[in-house]
Image: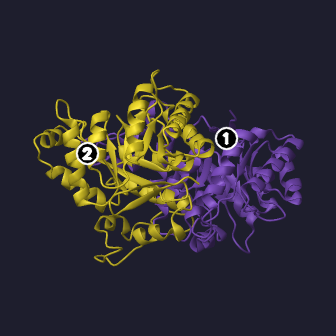
Chain colours: A yellow, B purple
Amino acid sequence: MTWTVVGSATGEVVIGDDRPFVVIGERINPTGRKLLAEEMKNGDFSRVERDVLAQVEAGAHMLDVNAGIPLADEPAILAKTIQLVQSLTNLPLSIDSSIVEALEAGLAVYQGKALVNSVTGEDERLERVLPLVKKYGAAVVAISNDETGISEDPDVRFAVAKLIVERALDHGIPREDVIVDPLLMPIGAMPTAGRQVFRILGRLRDELHVNSTCGASNVSFGLPNREGINGAFLAMAIASGLTSAITNPIAEGVRTAVMAADVLQGNDQDASRWIRTHRVGPPDGDVGGRRVNRRRAGPGAETGAGAGAVG
Amino acid sequence: MTWTVVGSATGEVVIGDDRPFVVIGERINPTGRKLLAEEMKNGDFSRVERDVLAQVEAGAHMLDVNAGIPLADEPAILAKTIQLVQSLTNLPLSIDSSIVEALEAGLAVYQGKALVNSVTGEDERLERVLPLVKKYGAAVVAISNDETGISEDPDVRFAVAKLIVERALDHGIPREDVIVDPLLMPIGAMPTAGRQVFRILGRLRDELHVNSTCGASNVSFGLPNREGINGAFLAMAIASGLTSAITNPIAEGVRTAVMAADVLQGNDQDASRWIRTHRVGPPDGDVGGRRVNRRRAGPGAETGAGAGAVG
């Protein structure tokens, strides 16, 4: 069993196939969020603060932090955001940028063992990012594309992942500190996207013995009821081998699917978290102290759920 | 690709890995439903009628029909129930009994190609049920236990399934007319139950090349929010290879998970069924003519679903 350990100054998270699935909150990301981008650029981090607290309350295990704002000083903003987020929570962070200087600026201020998001299979990227990962003793997300782009053949994408793991080993980064992202395309644009990813995930677990992650919300791009697609995708991907995902912990459909998948994988001991979250309590009572769970635990929760429940 | 075709006098359903998942409605079953058992025994089939119509409206592809009532004339009641159900719907039926005489009575009155539910790997059962399946040109559910009981080793259960398929072939029943049930235990009682079944399902698809089914509601026995567990289980099992299930089509969590899994397996062409069901229509409009879908298509359906949706 491969365990990836990441941490903050005082917190630690273990990612592994025999562990509860790790949800990496996706919300701190100005991509496509004009208002947030504008605010972050102007030094207003109030919305970031709210996104941190909401994701922590919703039960995220880690938070992704991205500061990709066009025409802004991304390294400086990313470093500042990371310092702010670490002052608000002890969840480990994923430092998310496509700019190497931003990754380095983030790592320089980060307290603990970070997850660097990400490196691809292109030679130039590998030679710039992997030394940073090694220098700061971080873990890294390896995205399985290379100079030739993103192959539609899952076995080619697996081969790219294998190459990145080998290159990481060459740099002194152990296998357990490489988390592979098999690259998830929108299913509405590519009907084979799901099966491709399920196949790669099985090989990552069984043959390459590495942990995995993906940007899970991408799969439902362009479709209605995205939460329904995202939740089912996560359950299916977890059964196939996925051990973490960058996704929205605030979406109830996502959270319920992940918790149920933990039960079904045998990773929620005695289903105790599931029972604590879903049992029917007194109408205004406090079940486990998490307000956000109350909506799910109403008296109608079991209606029509199973065979033979009512005459 | 293995296709199992079952039918009624005028309807047909194809089960296969490249086809939409087949939901076999579980509701017509007096087990644990005292009132229904009493009514059926006394010749009152009004509740059966309602269960037929509700499951048809909810989008079931087939219906399971069970008349297992203690101290009653099961063969006669099963035959009568089947005739009634076939007068109400043209969905193909699964004839469900552990009593061979009841299976035969059901087959004798059935119009079309039925699914016989079920045969186990015990020698005596095989030699009594398989000739009936052959005689009536039916398909059959093969449950992967035998004289030694239900093994906890998925590879032993796979071996039992393989043996049943071979015995069916000996009787002139083609491979595509055997649908294997890998036997799903309650996850609350056996934390390995999910992984065991996911593993068997993959081997059934990739090595034995047969379709599969299971009584999916069983997995959540004893847990709260059974619908949440059942929906996630089905998505995970579908990714692992499951091609049909005996479950509750009326449970919204189950229906949504199955529909989303079809999209993610690439089996809902252009996601057209998903989009038709979930798109936001006019408040009192008719989306695809199915009243039961309206609840899901409210304006809040996409809230918080994906990254970067709102500023």
Local secondary structure at mark 1: strand
Residue A214 coordinates in the image, percent (x, y): 43, 42
The residue beneath circle 1 is B7
Please state the horizontal and vertical placement of residue B63, each as a whole percent of the image.
61, 51
Q: Secondary structure at mark 2?
A: loop
Residue under the point 46% across and 45% down: A233
Q: CA distance from mark 1 to mark 2?
A: 37 Å
Residue name at image x 56 percent, y 35 percent: A162
**Left or right, B24 with reference to B80:** left
Q: Is A41 in front, or is A75? A: A75
Relative to B256, does residue A304 appear above or below in the rendering?
Answer: below
The lab-note entry on whether marks 1 and 2 share a chain reads yes
In the rendered structure, which amino acid carries the disc numbered 2?
Answer: Pro
Label 1–label 2 contact, CB within 8 A: no
A80 sits left or right of B112 in the view: left
In terms of depth relative to the viewer, which is nearer, B66 or A92? A92
Q: Position of residue B39 (x, y in %)?
A: 60, 70
Q: Return the chain for callout 1.
A: B
Can residue B27 be seen from the camera position used here? yes
Q: Quadrant of the C terminus of chain B?
A: top left
Residue identified by numbered label 2? B283
- In what quadrant of the picture does the N terminus of chain B appear? top right
Quadrant of the rendered image containing residue B190 = bottom right
Relative side of A197 to A227, left or right: right
Density class for disc 2 (Cα within 10 Å; few <14, some 14-19, many ≥20) is few
Chain at tag 2: B
Is residue B266 in sight in this rendering? Answer: no
